[in-house]
Image: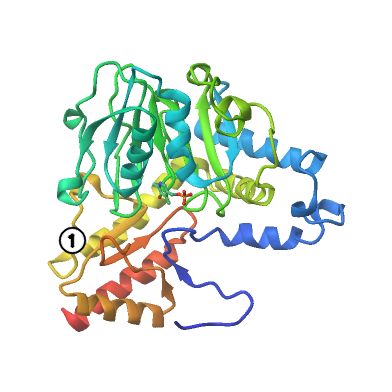
Amino acid sequence: MATNASADHRSHNFSAGPAILPVEVLQRAREELLNYRGTGSSIMELSHRGREYVEVDAQARSRLIELLGLGDDFEVIFLQGGASTQFMMVPMNFLREGRTADYLNTGSWAKKAIKEARIIGNVHEAFSSEENNYNRVPKDSDIRMSENPVYLHFTSNNTIFGTQQPSEPASAEVPLVCDASSDFLSRPIDAKRFGLIYAGAQKNAGPSGVTIVLIRKDFLEGARTEGLPSMVRYKTHAGTMFNTPPTFAVYMVNLILGWLQEKGGLSAMDLHNREKAKLLYDQIDRDDFYRTPVENDSRSLMNVVFRLPSEELEKTFLKEAEANDMHGLKGHRSVGGLRASIYNACPRESVETLAAFMADFRKKHG
Ligand SMILES: *Cc1c(COP(=O)(O)O)cnc(C)c1O
């Protein structure tokens, strides 16, 4: 790997997660690291019940509510344990005896969520693209719901396979529960359709260590309390700080939310992300040299998955990309090939550099 030891050097980082963060945010964190606002301590070293952290926590909540247009209808909770812990918490809290929860099986993460839910209760797979190695997400007409499910769970962006729901699936009266880990805050959403949204922060919203959970208040009313240990009940965490939150991770998320607001919010981000993704898909679509297994209508704006004519060439591509300071392009081990993750914080300049490199590489090897 090419290394550049100069203290402020930034490489072209296409890692799927933990992923690139905005450089302005890292700089701000560095400035405040030793002495947070005159306290003489780092925010990491201050009590989670103290004025400074409580302010950070409250600001992060209100910024989330504003950016996503949640109004007064949602609780915002910061939890630990990753999105993977939500795979069990969602059914533990909402999947009652004698009822069924519907899931869209659109990738490895969706499958893991289904596996956990099956331990808790009845699960119905309302759609699966597993047979075709998860090359697409469903159209509304592909979804076969069970009768009166408690929720419909879906993964808005399938990080590993490079597919993304173009919009929320139709679900009539059924509340949506969404694993939004890898496209959270990348575009506006229709909040009123959701009962619960969760996202591990480390793809698009911050560092690892915090999971953001948004729960609509009327949906939360139906959450279980009896027979559940305190830590896995959503009601334990809603509206209060039950135990120590991951304070530094929440602080970083708050800085990123401020950055998002400065950049014009989620509509501006959506446009920026569409433009970036187009640069790469245009390269892929030019001829048969690059190809993607993903169906056109399901293409992700966050994780661009592609193959070359041979595994040999893929290895060469990766090696030469590294030599040109482009990192994190190797596809997930379950899929192979290449994957460029181009989340909010990935600068357009990095994507332009990669697109130019792809064009060059085709000329040399095509
Ligand atoms: C990364 C990822 C996860 C797993 O997140 P953890 O925080 O590691 O548990 C779950 N779902 C999706 C869509 C992901 O991209």
Task: Write down the residue under mark 1.
Answer: 285
Residue occupying image coordinates x 38% and y 71%: 353
- Vertical position of residue 318 compared to residue 41: above or below: below
Residue occupying image coordinates x 66% and y 62%: 27
Left or right position of 42 against 314 = right
Viewer-proximal residue, 352 or 244? 244
Image color mode: rainbow
Left or right position of 33 against 25 = right
Q: Residue 151's image quarter?
A: top left
Viewer-proximal residue, 316 or 177? 177
Q: Secondary structure at mark 1?
A: helix
Residue 268: horizontal and vertical position, in percent? 46, 44
Res 317 visible: yes
Q: Residues within 10 Å of mark 1 (few under 14, many from 20)?
A: few
Residue 59: horizontal and vertical position, in percent? 68, 38
Quadrant including the C terminus: bottom left
Residue at the left extreme of this rendering: 288
Residue occupying image coordinates x 18% and y 61%: 285
Viewer-proximal residue, 334 or 20? 334
Residue 173: horizontal and vertical position, in percent? 33, 16
Q: Amino acid at mark 1?
A: Asp
Left or right position of 138 against 5 = left
Res 185 visible: no
- Vertical position of residue 17 compared to residue 158: above or below: below
Viewer-proximal residue, 149 or 31? 149
Quadrant including the N terminus: bottom left
Residue 220: horizontal and vertical position, in percent? 51, 21
Residue occupying image coordinates x 58% and y 40%: 79
